Image (tube, grey):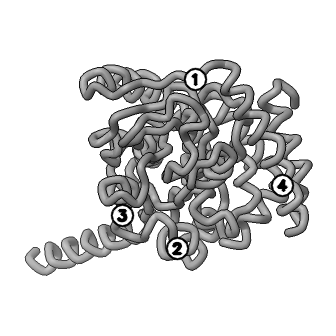
Amino acid sequence: MHMMTKVAVAALMTAGIAGEAAATEWNVSVWGKRRAFTEHIEKIAELVSEKTGGEFTMNISYGGLSKNTENLDGIQIGAFEMAQICAGYHPDKNPSLTVLELPFLGVNSLEMETEVSMKLYEHPAVQDDLARWNATLLMPSPMPQYNIAGVGDAPKTLADFKGLSVRATGGIGSAMETVGAVPTSVTSEEARQAMDSGVVKAVAFAPHAHMSFGTIEPAKWWTTNLNPGTVNCPVVVNTDALAALTDAEREALLGSVEEALAYYIDFYNNETMAKWGPLLEEKGVEQITYSDEALKEFRAAAAGPIAAQWVEDNAAKGLPAQELLDLVTGVIGGGS
């Protein structure tokens, strides 16, 4: 009887080890801290675990696996299976995505940002662009239009931006250059330090990032409606890891994207933005609103020329740049 018990225990242990081996765990590289920007990742991890009875789980690491500017490299070598990236951090690595970072595209909601991103991600040239990094695009991290918080004299007119050092990446940085500002490309995690040390006087962020990274703390002013653009920060997965999933696991992942994005948008609109206005009031931050005429002038100076330059530069790299831009503007304008 004693011998039988030992055999039974050994069999159970073996079954347990086999069960563990069958489970799938993905490592996910993000940065900063949990915030509106990462809620769809937290949600999809929850949904995938639920749908697979805990057999497919995600270990979400906030900065423990990679620098945010190196997440795409980590995906390429399989250092982790999923990551959030921002196209503007490394435009040369993902030029096709930077079309969504052009200024004044006319995106006016998180829902529209999601729609146009997903449509672009389906384009073969975009998929080929990311395939160079063994990456498959999973879903966007839709953000509202950026605005600027800063210290020192508030830019009451567009002319007041002349000489102002501002943390602004991608197309937003290019747009700010057209009004004489001096864009500086530092990562989101470096923005507060750059502001405190005087490297920049202002930072262009979406509201959640101003709160998460502390740039609203020293700010004296905020532009309510400059709306020069936003950045595109998709969630990507390692293509080999995606292929290695079972059919059920892959369905659990891909079938959860829509619900995760809906959760994200609801969270951003109803949680984050509900806190933003009261926070500005509480801190006594001066809110600057520009006239329609001034904004029209800004758009005229920035939108067309920067888009034309983007098409020229990226067509030279072999991308169907005009086609990508037309796709984006078509979706935004209510086209296909």
Nearer the observer: mark 4 or 1; the answer is: 1
Residue denoted by label 4: 309
Comes first in the chain, label 3 or label 1: 3
**Residue 146 rendering spot, x and y as whole percentages:** 54, 38
Comes first in the chain, label 4 or label 2: 2
Residue denoted by label 1: 290
Q: Amino acid at mark 4?
A: Gln
Q: Identify the residue at horizontal 81%, vertical 55% (top origin).
A: 310
Residue denoted by label 3: 63
Asked if the residue under mark 4 is in contact with the one under mark 3, i.e. CB atoms within 8 Å, the reply is: no
Q: Secondary structure at mark 4?
A: helix
Q: Identify the residue at horizontal 47%, vertical 25% (top origin).
A: 288
The vertical placement of 135 against 284, above or below, is below
Q: Identify the residue at horizontal 67%, vertical 19% (top origin).
A: 292
Distance from disc 2 to disc 1, alpha carbons, whole Å, reads 42 Å
Residue 242 visible in rendering:
yes
Comes first in the chain, label 2 or label 3: 3
